[in-house]
Image (cartoon, rainbow, N blue to C red):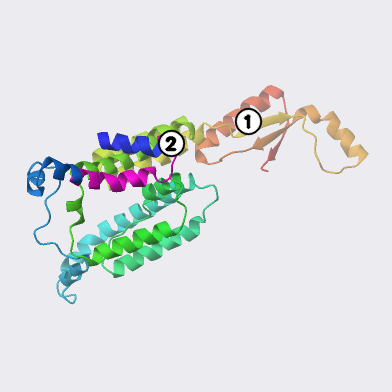
Amino acid sequence: LAFALFLFYVAYRVEHVAALPTVLVATPILFFIVLWIAGVSLEEAQDGGWIPRPDPDPAAGWECFHLYNGFQGIAWHTLPHQIPKVVGLVCVVAFGSVLDIAAIQTEQPQPLDFDGELRMIGVSNIASGFSGGFTGSYIFSQTIFSQRQRVTSSSNGWVVAIGEFLLFLMPVDVLQFFPGFYIGGVMAFFGIDIMLDWLMHSRKKVSLPEYGLLLLTFFLVMFWGVIEGCAAGVAASAVVFIVVYGITPVVDVRPGVCSTAMRSIEERAVLMKLRQQIVCLELKGYLFFGAALQVSDKLLREVRGLGARWVVMDFT
């Protein structure tokens, strides 16, 4: 946690663009230099829990394809039982992808092409599925983090892609080169940064019911799990939408409104005489069944109070 707070301080208090990368690169190096100066061996550091133990039999990522054994190692009889989970996974990934793009858009000065971004996510998931990979979406935390550090070049993505591909080819346990506090601190740093954005800074950007819905979804995911929590959050958002827009004023009664239509002098004279008996009912906002009672009650109450005989409904 202390290392995470230190990273947070460097990221948001030190202005130089190379400050945080320097800390991230130098910390493991300094750690092993301190171990060498203190005369602590790697085995002793591993026994003390400072660094993880290496995998005794590390394997390259591509070796996972041996599990398929020419498609003979696949238990096809279990496939029908996985269909509900696959459908739920598709819904979660689709919903999460929209949220990821929306989160990235909040940090972008230019508008994103949502359709293009979603198509790219879909194509990427298809390619990942055919190659035996996992489903997923943007790592929006890394994207936003890079933007805040003023790293906007496309070379950033190429470096990450090439680096991960090399790790996929090499039978090396990379985690053995990083101390435990370093891995935990980086993860905690990203977690703190995201939680501050969505649980604190978002309060100024959304209404009170929307903020309450955000907190509710967060705690539901924490206690029930991702799929169940997201499903409950979607259901709660539908209820909030019905309640909020059911009480939102959607009717404006305007007596004595002049018409913009061109009429003869005689017709205009008649309308002027009847002007106080005509009211214009302007409908606005979201009109649905939840607001039907509000519309009818306000219409009858105000029209009767004005003594009007004719009602003109404005749907524009």
The location of residue 78, given as percent across then percent down, is 17, 65
> Which range of residues does the magenta coloring cover?
13-32
The location of residue 107, given as percent across then percent down, is 48, 45
228 or 197, which lies in front? 197
Q: Is residue 214 visible?
A: no
The crowd level at tag 1 (other Cα within 10 Å; few <14, some 14-19, many 20+) is some
Q: CA distance from mark 2 to mark 1?
A: 25 Å
Quarter the N terminus occupies: top left
220 or 169, which lies in front? 169
Residue shown at 31% from the left, 61% from the top: 163
Quarter the C terminus occupies: top right
The residue that mark 1 highlights is: 299
For label 1, the SS is helix
Residue type marked 2: Val
Residue shown at 35% from the left, 62% from the top: 161
Q: Is residue 162 visible?
A: yes
Q: Is residue 129 left or right of residue 17?
A: left
Q: Is residue 102 left or right of residue 38?
A: right
Which is more foreground, mark 2 or mark 1? Answer: 2
Residue shown at 67% from the left, 25% from the top: 304
Residue shown at 7% from the left, 48% from the top: 43
Most frequent secondary structure within the magenta stretch:
helix
Residue 62 numbered mark, or none: none
Q: Is residue 262 left or right of residue 105?
A: right
The location of residue 67, given as percent across then percent down, is 16, 69
Residue 253 falls inside the magenta stretch: no
The residue that mark 2 highlights is: 240
Residue 69, above or below 275: below
Q: Is residue 197 left or right of residue 295?
A: left
The location of residue 135, given as percent across then percent down, is 31, 59
Residue 165, above or below 50: below
